[in-house]
Image (cartoon, rainbow, N blue to C red):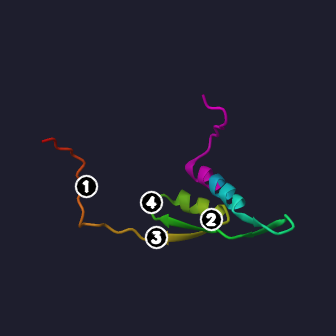
């Protein structure tokens, strides 16, 4: 059974924004006296897909988004069949 969890009626963008904001907060470095320091991890590499809500979620979480261009690799084949001898 699940002991810890929460179900929220949120869309994809808002869910991503909450997760990224939580990760951003967990990556904050603490100063030697225990106070909040600076964020050392504030960049998200995003493989562009046709869903703007994820891009907006990165920005609303206070992170920097770097779009990584995709390209088609025609040198490989996708053959998921298994042959038995």
Q: Residue at x 67, y 65 (%)?
A: 62
Q: Is residue 67 above or below residue 23?
A: below
**Which callout, 1 or 4, points to the residue nearer the camera?**
1
**Of the numbered discs in the image, which one, if any, rests on residue 68?**
3
- Percent across and percent down for residue 74 are 24, 66
Q: Secondary structure at mark 1?
A: loop
Dominant secondary structure of the magenta stretch? loop
Q: Earlier in the sequence, mark 1 or mark 2?
A: 2
Q: Earlier in the sequence, mark 4 or mark 2?
A: 4
Q: Residue at x 24, y 63 (%)?
A: 76
Residue where numbered disc 2 is placed: 59
Total marks drawn? 4
The residue positioned 68% from the left and 55% from the top of the image is 22
Between the residue at mark 3 and the residue at mark 4, the CA separation in whole angstroms equals 13 Å
Question: What's the mark number on residue 78?
Answer: 1
Is 1 on the left or on the right of 72, as rendered? right
Helix, strand or loop at label 3? It is strand
Task: Identify the magenta region.
Answer: 1-17
Which residue corresponds to mark 4? 50
Judged by depth in the image, the label closer to the viewer, 1 or 2, is: 1
Q: Residues within 10 Å of mark 1 (few under 14, many from 20)?
A: few
């Amino acid at each position: 059974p699940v002991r810890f969890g929460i179900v929220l009626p949120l869309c994809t963008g808002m869910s991503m924004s909450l997760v990224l904001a939580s990760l951003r907060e967990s990556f904050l470095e603490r100063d030697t006296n225990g106070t909040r320091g600076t964020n050392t991890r504030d960049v998200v590499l995003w493989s562009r897909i046709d869903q703007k809500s994820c891009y907006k979620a990165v920005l609303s979480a206070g992170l920097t988004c770097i779009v990584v261009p995709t390209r088609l690799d025609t040198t490989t084949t996708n053959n998921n069949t298994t042959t038995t001898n």
